[in-house]
Amino acid sequence: MNNKPSFFSNILVNQVLQFGFIAIFTNITGYLLFVLCTLYLKFSPYLVISFLYPLAITASYILNKDLTFKQEKTFKKQKIIFITLYLSAYLLNILILHIAATIFFVPSYLAQGIAIIVLGIYLFLMQKKYVYV
């Protein structure tokens, strides 16, 4: 009998699912606000992203720390890495929006939908490896 835990252990599967639920909740909320602000209120997509990211970072940190990765204590280094990851995600988000709009002429609401998926995967992997270790 092989008693070694598999790569796709229950803990990893549970973390992916929990992270996914939190991401779906925060991203649907953020995306609806993005669409409202860009399509209906005619704000710049870059301005809206700049406003929404700090809100998303705060929600994600609190929810994932407590629910996904179940960490009671936080450390200064952990917070710095977390903020750095989200800053990199913010910059990647701006880059995705810019490339989609200027090179491929994709509407910002579609580009943001793509960015949410790509950056969600990126952020889970980076948080799992560097923040909640």
Image (cartoon, grey):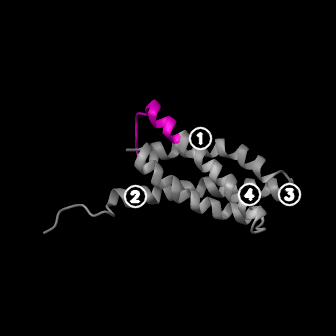
Residue 68 in view of the camera:
no
Which quadrant is the C terminus positioned in? top left
Q: Are marks 1 and 4 in contact (CB under 8 Å)?
A: no
N-terminal of the pair, mark 2 or mark 1, is 2
In the rendered view, would you say 86 is above or below 77?
below
Q: Could you tell me residue 5's position as x and y percent?
A: 24, 61
Q: Could you tell me residue 105's position as x and y percent?
A: 78, 68
Which residue corresponds to mark 1?
58
- Marks 4/2: CA distance? 35 Å
Q: Could you tell me residue 47's position as x and y percent?
A: 77, 46
What's the mark number on residue 14? Answer: 2
Q: Secondary structure at mark 1?
A: helix
**Which of the two residues, 130 or 62, is positioned nearer the viewer here?**
130
Q: Could you tell me residue 26's position as x and y percent?
A: 61, 52
Which residue corresponds to mark 3?
40
- Marks 2/1: CA distance? 22 Å
Total label count?
4
Which residue corresponds to mark 4?
98
